[in-house]
Amino acid sequence: MKQHLLLAALFVVMVLAMLKVLFRLIDIWPDNGDPMLVVALVTQDSLIVFAITIGGIMFSSMIADLVDEQELHNGLRQEGVFTSVLGFAAKASSSLGLIIGGLMLEHFIGFPRGEAPGTIDEDVLFRLAISDGLLINIFILIPVYLLTKYDLTREDLADMQTGLQARRICRFYTRS
């Protein structure tokens, strides 16, 4: 269930991010200056934040389940290792994203420096829209693929919890 909710959240984020650009390209998104543009952007971003929040909750819960599984297999509880790996992965992917974004802006999009708003070439704006709305969102397929490897079921989790509880009770009585 957690896996399915996280997958759904990732797909919602990906689709909503793509829809904004797609709707602008096919002229159903409000034009700049239209008061409905703010409503559309706030609505879209609110839905994205909602999906990201649900996904974050599911992800954290799945990590806790993996910590339990790891403890059951080797007898060690290592939340710190999991947390540090997740922190490093977040920092590394954020840094890589900034580097890739900068390279794309400079080389693929050709975004000009110091231009006044409204004077940027339509070609540049189109490449920016395609990059932001479509190309970047394809990277969401990486965690989607990795989530297909997560195979813990509710029954597995219940069995793990039972096994861990039995092990803890056994340790308690052998120490006393």
Image (cartoon, rainbow, N blue to C red):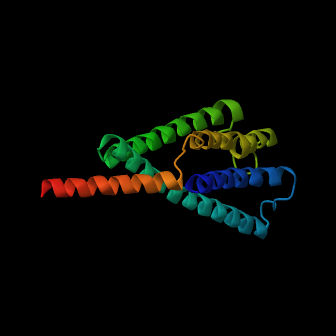
Q: Is residue 64 above or below residue 121?
A: below
* Residue 1 % position (x, y): 58, 57
Give the image quarter of residue 53: bottom right
* Residue 111 % position (x, y): 68, 38
* Residue 62 % position (x, y): 48, 52
The residue drawn where x is 81% and y is 62% is 30
Q: Is residue 77 above or below residue 53?
A: above
The residue drawn where x is 52% and y is 35% is 96
Residue sticking out furthest to the left: 176
Q: Is residue 105 above or below residue 38?
A: above
* Residue 3 % position (x, y): 58, 52
Nearer to me, 13 or 171: 171
Nearer to me, 143 or 49: 143
**Side of 100 relative to 162 (left or right):** right
Give the image quarter of residue 166: bottom left
The residue drawn where x is 24% and y is 54% is 170
